[in-house]
Amino acid sequence: MVALLTYKNYVGVLQCDQAGKGFQGRVLNIADEITFAGQSVEEVRKSFHDSLDDYLDSCARELRPPAPPLDGRLCLSLPVELHQRLALAANQTGLDLADWITRLLQWALENDPEATLRLGAYGADAPSGSA
């Protein structure tokens, strides 16, 4: 089981620990490692909040900016041919490229959530879509 938690716009991923006796998690998409754990959902939620608050307090004390939370913006570098193909597909639907990609990703996650696991299993060798 994998679940997401959000707090102050930061996202944490939560998993059952390997022994199956509790939960452990980490904050996603930041360079600093922020982890949390607990025996129940409520305990792990509190641990997530406490760990993130400790991180933000530590950054303030050290006068360094914290890693920004996810804000809905994503910058991608794509192969030119893929970018062109995506733009054409979006144009054919009457949507701009960003809206079309957003809908495509939402559809993929809702209709084939296991696809992310299959693609993740490839790691750096994931198919690029070019033949």
Image (cartoon, rainbow, N blue to C red):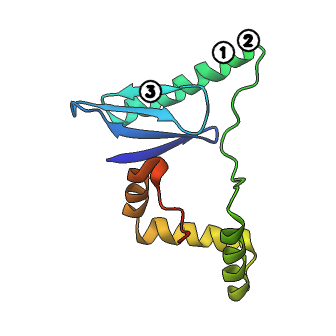
Quadrant of the image occupied by residue 20: top left
Label whose residue precedes the other's in the sequence (3 or 1): 3
State the image coordinates of residue 17 (x, y, percent, origin top left): 29, 32
As helix, strand or loop, the secondary structure at mark 3 comes to strand
Q: Is residue 34 above or below residue 87?
A: above
Query: In the drawing, what numbered circle is on residue 36?
Result: 3
Which residue shows up at 57% across the image and 27% down it?
A: 52
Quadrant of the image occupied by residue 101: bottom right
The residue that disc 1 covers is 58
Number of labelled discs?
A: 3
Which residue shows up at 69% across the image and 31% down it?
A: 67
Using residue 107 as the reference point, say whether residue 66 is left or right of it: right
Q: Residues within 10 Å of mark 2 (few under 14, many from 20)?
A: few
Asked if labels 2 and 1 touch by Cβ distance under 8 angstroms, the answer is: yes
Kind of residue at disc 3: Phe
As helix, strand or loop, the secondary structure at mark 2 comes to loop
Using residue 43 as the reference point, say whether residue 91 is left or right of it: right
Query: In the drawing, what numbered circle is on residue 62?
Result: 2
